[in-house]
Image: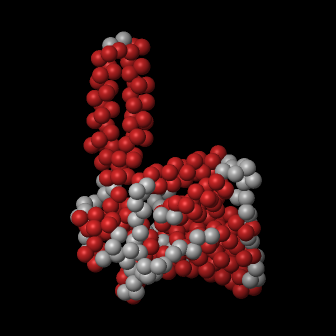
Amino acid sequence: MVWLDVLDFEEKGDRENALLNAKHVVEMDESHAGAWMAIARLNLPPLTRGKPLMPNLKQCSKAMSALKKVIHYDPDNDLAWELGGALLIDHLGMLEHGLEWWEDRRKNEPYQVTPLVEQIGVLARMGYYEECAIKLDELFSEEMDAPANKQLLRMQSVRQMVGKAAKMEATEIFNPRDKSDSRWEIIRRMKNKKPITENRFLFTFTAPIVFLLGILVMDALGDTALGTVAVFLIILFLFATITRLSNSLLNNLNRHALDLDRAIDFETTTGKICIPDDIRESKLYSSMMDLKTPALNERMDMIINSGEKLPKKWELNAP
């Protein structure tokens, strides 16, 4: 009956009483995975249409504690695994813990594609491309579960993402642990230059090229009805093609921001600092942190206040 009260209160939007009753359920039955899942969900901000979930550090911590109980008693709860992975990686920046989280999932479901996709994404962010290649081979092997259409799109997307990142760093992979890495000086020179957004790049680079090419095509095909349709289709093709080809250029223009983002990942992952003070005080750093979640910003403040330096020989514990 208490569990039904939880569901009833939650349906009515009374989250406070729903949470109190869910806690009462687990006091009576420690192994009630559904109640633990409710506690995790109710400790996070309510989902609002059109707005992303933005919990603070305390909310993330409480939710993660409950989610660990969920997967302990119900290890096949995919929603709990996905929510826990999102909190660890996207909201807390604890990428190494995220790798371990998804590795634990693989112990129960070794042929499921989602854990591998998530791990590859983390490894690419940290610059571990050799490990990415190994896991990509495994991801697309015949022994893996047949992916649904949505999963297949994610698999293709992560493979393209790794390929682009590895190509961009083909000659030099940025290592934030090394203070003498030449990329630090480039970041320093561009520390007051914010990254170019995709929309800005679209309007300042891609759109003008497509517009000029469209005019040339229109002059060539004339003003007939058939010509108008052909021009429209050609412009769509040109727009898609140029956008795809120009993505590499955009990444190269934003390389300094992407490098600093990796340094931030190293700090939030290790709980130790590596970003020089003059860069941390820059417009570039501020713009990158503005894109981060409230919980990650809270963690970063704690990491900076601790003042503990990131060892040069630190290595990610990649599964």
Side of 246 relative to 314 (left or right): left
Say left or right for 266 vs 66.
left
**In the figure, 143 relative to 275: above or below?**
above
Q: Position of residue 85 (x, y in %)?
A: 58, 68
Q: Nearer the viewer, residue 4 or 130?
A: 130
Where residue 318 appears, as percent x and y from the top left, is 58, 70
**Quadrant assignment for the N terminus:** bottom right
Specify the quadrant of the image occupied by residue 105: bottom right
Place of residue 193 in the rendered image (x, y in percent of width and height, measured from the top left)? 25, 60
Q: Residue at x 34, y 61 (%)?
A: 257
Q: Residue 229 versus residue 52: which sits nearer the camera?
A: 229
Q: Is residue 84 visible?
A: no
Q: Position of residue 148 (x, y in %)?
A: 68, 48
Residue at the top extreme, as displayed: 224
Q: Residue at x 37, y 64 (%)?
A: 259
Residue positioned 40% across, 71% down in the render: 176
Q: Quadrant of residue 308?
A: bottom left
Looking at the figure, which quarter contains the C terminus?
bottom right
> Which of 128/228 is in front?
128
Q: Kindly identify the residue that appears in the image at 61 percent across and 55 percent down.
A: 136
